Image (tube, rainbow, N blue to C red):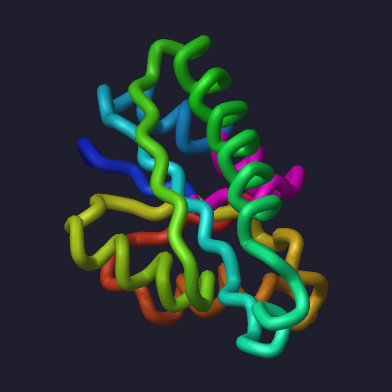
Amino acid sequence: MMWKKILVPLDGSKNSFRGLDMAIYLARQCGATLTGIFVLPRTPEKAFRRLQNPEKEALKIADKIMERAKLRSAQNGIVFNKKIDFGDPAYMIVKFAKSLNYDIIVIGARGQSGIKDIFLGSVSNYVLHKSSAPVVIVK
């Protein structure tokens, strides 16, 4: 199967970068481009009152992670586009993949959110069950 657009959710965890490595491998086989998506959870309204620009630091961290992924992709000859968004990570990944008709999603089994499910992380589990695109989960 020839994929042209591969979506890779990233959160900075080792598993998400293992997913990136698999996506790079697949992209090299197919001549595909990668899009990395980093979804920051929304900060509750009360936090906005206490902290000034609470998402500013999180955005800086997300951008550094995406730049690291872009560099790793470029070193392997792969075009990498980045997308940073806000919301529920699982929902936003599926929504973004569907809206731009990605051919496949390559995601790490567990990320930064902690262990909520026994074998899969809650985000990868949601994406696996809700995405209309094929999903590869990398452990």
How far across and how far down the image is residue 111, in percent? 71, 60
Residue at screen point 53% across, 70% down: 89
User: Where 68 falls versus 95 (above or below)?
Assistant: above
How far across and how far down the image is residue 56, in percent? 63, 54
Magenta-drawn stretch contains 12 = yes
Question: Which quadrant holds the N terminus?
Answer: top left
- Nearer to me, 120 or 33: 33
Please identify the quarter of the rendering in which residue 18 is found: top right
Residue at screen point 30% across, 61% down: 97
User: Where 33 falls versus 46 (above or below)?
Assistant: above
Q: Is residue 93 visible?
A: yes
- Nearer to me, 83 or 90: 83
How far across and how far down the image is residue 50, in percent? 77, 79
User: Where 65 falls versus 138 (above or below)?
Assistant: above
Image position of 21 (left or right of 52): left
Tell me how many marks there are: 0
Image position of 101 (left or right of 40): left
In the image, the segment drawn in magenta is 9-20
Residue at screen point 27% across, 72% down: 132
Residue at screen point 48% across, 55% down: 136
Q: Is residue 139 visible?
A: no
Residue lying at the far bottom of the rendered structure: 46
Magenta-drawn stretch contains 137 = no
Image position of 103 (left or right of 56): left
How far across and how far down the image is residue 34, in percent? 36, 35
- Nearer to me, 36 or 136: 36
